[in-house]
Image: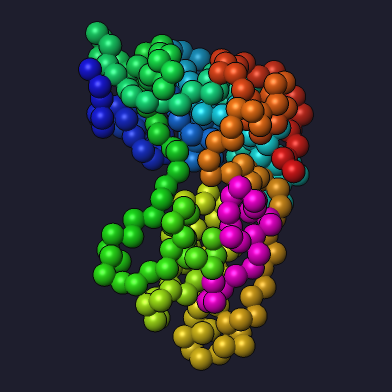
Amino acid sequence: MSVRRPDRITYRVPDLKDPATRARYAGKRTAVIGSGASAFTALASLADLAKAEDGTAAKTVWILRRGISGSTFGGGTADQLPARGALGLAAKAAVDEGHADAVTGFRTETIERDGDGRLVLVAEDGRRLDPVDEVIVLTGFRPDLSFLSELRLGLDERLQTPIELAPLIDPNQHSCGTVYPHGVNELSHPEQGVYLVGMKSYGRAPTFLALTGYEQVRSIVAAIAGDHEAAERVELVLPETGVCGGAGLFDQPDTDQQADGGGCCAPAPALIQLGTTDPAPTCG
């Protein structure tokens, strides 16, 4: 039977400091779906839980729709945002130390229950994974703009971001560090005085950083205050290393992938146990 949103599926990073939440995942087999900062946080937290249990039944299965490459875990010690680099290294350690098994090239189509009530992930190609007790889905977000349906918004059809901003943040072309500084001009809409800022301004693009949002707000507030010179004087220097390496919004065709897995996407689905290596370099 297909499972839509059972109580064993969550769409947020679990707070394992909460006793009730910790008990939910203790000693369980958990699937984490996603490859961004939220997924890294969950992997690291579940690994810490497994260590605290002395390696009892707790186990994590990490589900990725792409392969693992040099940029998967971000910039490590070379990341210009140290906390972000440390998070990627913690997730890598969870895999290296055997607390998480990475399953690559797996695009989940449905989740079913087995005879014991556990959850079975089924891929688009029909492959089925071993049952898990819990599923944590951390596959990104898109903005909910339903409450703005009566306003005149100028949005890019593909990215759901302001039209002038779309080419500047296209994840198929840009990483976090190559986004051109932008402000009130790029964030304006046909509806006068309406602006989308922060994560909502990035639509479906996954490369937003808080530093970008701070500068967006500063520029818009300056414009509202009538200081147009300050509003257009947008200055922002973003780090070029880290998990947002311009991997793109959509999957690349199989013909573009390197057979040896050296590109951003590995062609063959696989269960991977990573050995301990030095921090991986970032993707160019």
Q: What residue is rendered at 44% in x and 56% in y?
A: 157
- Looking at the image, residue 123 sits to the left or right of residue 243; the answer is left
Q: In which quarter of the image is the C terminus?
A: top right
Q: Where is 40 relative to 147, above or below? A: above
Residue 136, quarter of picture: top left
Report the front residue among 135 and 153. 153
Position of residue 47 measured from the top left corner of the image (x, y, whole percent): 52, 26
Residue 113, quarter of picture: top left
Report the front residue among 209 and 251. 251
**Can residue 220 be seen in the rendering of this structure?**
yes
Q: What residue is rendered at 57% in x and 88% in y?
A: 228
Task: Give the colour scheme shown.
Answer: rainbow
Q: What residue is rendered at 42% in x and 68% in y?
A: 154
Please say whether residue 75 is one of the residues in the magenta stretch. no
Position of residue 74 measured from the top left corner of the image (x, y, whole percent): 66, 40
**Can residue 99 be seen in the rendering of this structure?**
no
Q: Across the whole image, how many numbered discs are drawn on residues?
A: 0
Position of residue 85 measured from the top left corner of the image (x, y, whole percent): 66, 43
Report the front residue among 15 and 8. 8
Q: Residue most toward the front?
A: 255
Q: Residue most toward the bottom?
A: 226
- Looking at the image, residue 281 sits to the left or right of residue 234; the answer is right
Question: In the rendered structure, which segment of residues is drawn in magenta?
Answer: 167-186
Residue 230, quarter of picture: bottom right
Q: Where is 200 relative to 62, above or below? A: below
Q: In which quarter of the image is the N terminus?
A: top left
Q: What residue is rendered at 41% in x and 22% in y?
A: 124
Position of residue 215 measured from the top left corner of the image (x, y, whole percent): 58, 70
